[in-house]
Image (cartoon, rainbow, N blue to C red):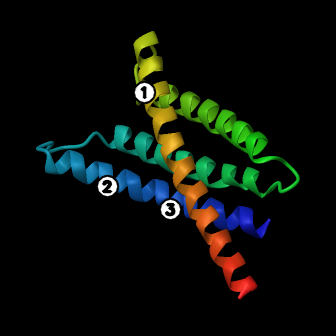
């Protein structure tokens, strides 16, 4: 439960941080005013997105599952939640083209992050094994 709460807080704060970064990007690109309702909607969406990405990583703590099963369950969980959120908030148009665009972007970024974490933790395990053997 403690891990769930910590990851929840970190995810919500990371989502809020991304929302602020995106807002500043819009402002610095010449947008002089912001729609407060749209700002709140996007901010809450970013925080919710940060939360479910952070909390869903708990799936990888099921050590009795294979890495393939963990990855498939995690991928399905986050892609369904992200699609519902992104289309519900209006981050992408609810069209076939919008669906395909978000699908390609999501899969590319998912694979990039998955491989980055995989190689990072593989390297960490090798370092620990090397220290144990010496």
Q: Position of residue 113 (x, y in %)?
A: 51, 49
Tell me which numbered mark, 2 or 1, is placed earlier along the sequence.
2
The residue furthest bottom is 134
Q: Residue at x 76, y 70 (%)?
A: 2
Of residues 2 and 124, the one nearer the viewer is: 124
What is the CA distance from the residue labelled 2 to the residue labelled 1?
19 Å
Indicate the quadrant containing the C terminus: top left, top right, bottom left or bottom right.
Answer: bottom right
Residue under pointer 1: 90
SS under mark 2: helix
CB contact under 8 Å: marks 3 and 1: no
| Residues at marks 3 and 1, CA–CA distance in whole angstroms | 22 Å
Q: Nearer the viewer, residue 68 or 40?
A: 68
Kindly state the secondary structure of the residue where label 3 is placed: helix
Q: Nearer the viewer, residue 110 or 89?
A: 110
Graded by Cα atoms within 10 Å as few (under 14), some (14 to 19) or many (20 or more), the crowding at tag 3 reads some
Secondary structure beneath dot 1 equals: loop
Q: Residue furthest left?
A: 30
| Mark 2: few/some/many CA within 10 Å (<14, 14-19, 20+) | few
**Which residue matches tag 2?**
21
Tell me if residue 57 comes above or below residue 127 in the rendering: above
Sequence-wise, which precedes: disc 3 or disc 1? 3
Give me the disc on residue 13. Answer: 3
Going by the image, does 99 lie left or right of 21?
A: right
Taking the spot 36% from the left edge, 37% from the top edge, the residue there is: 38
Q: CA distance from mark 2 to mark 3?
A: 12 Å
**Are dots 2 and 1 in contact, CB under 8 Å?**
no
Q: Is residue 75 above or below residue 65?
A: above
Q: Residue at x 57, y 58 (%)?
A: 119
At label 1, counting other C-alpha atoms closer than 10 Å, the crowd grade (few under 14, some 14-19, many 20 or more) is few
């Amino acid at each position: 439960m403690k891990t769930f709460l910590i990851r929840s807080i970190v995810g919500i704060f990371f989502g809020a941080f991304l929302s602020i970064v995106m807002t500043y990007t819009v402002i610095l690109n010449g947008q002089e005013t912001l729609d407060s309702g749209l700002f709140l909607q996007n901010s809450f969406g970013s925080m919710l997105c940060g939360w479910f990405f952070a909390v869903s990583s708990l799936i990888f703590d099921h050590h009795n599952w294979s890495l393939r099963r963990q990855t498939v369950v995690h991928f399905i969980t986050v892609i369904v939640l992200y699609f519902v959120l992104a289309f519900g908030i209006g981050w992408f148009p609810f069209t076939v083209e919008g669906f395909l665009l978000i699908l390609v972007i999501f899969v590319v970024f998912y694979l990039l992050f998955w491989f980055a974490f995989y190689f990072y933790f593989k390297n960490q395990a090798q370092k620990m094994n090397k220290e144990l053997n010496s």
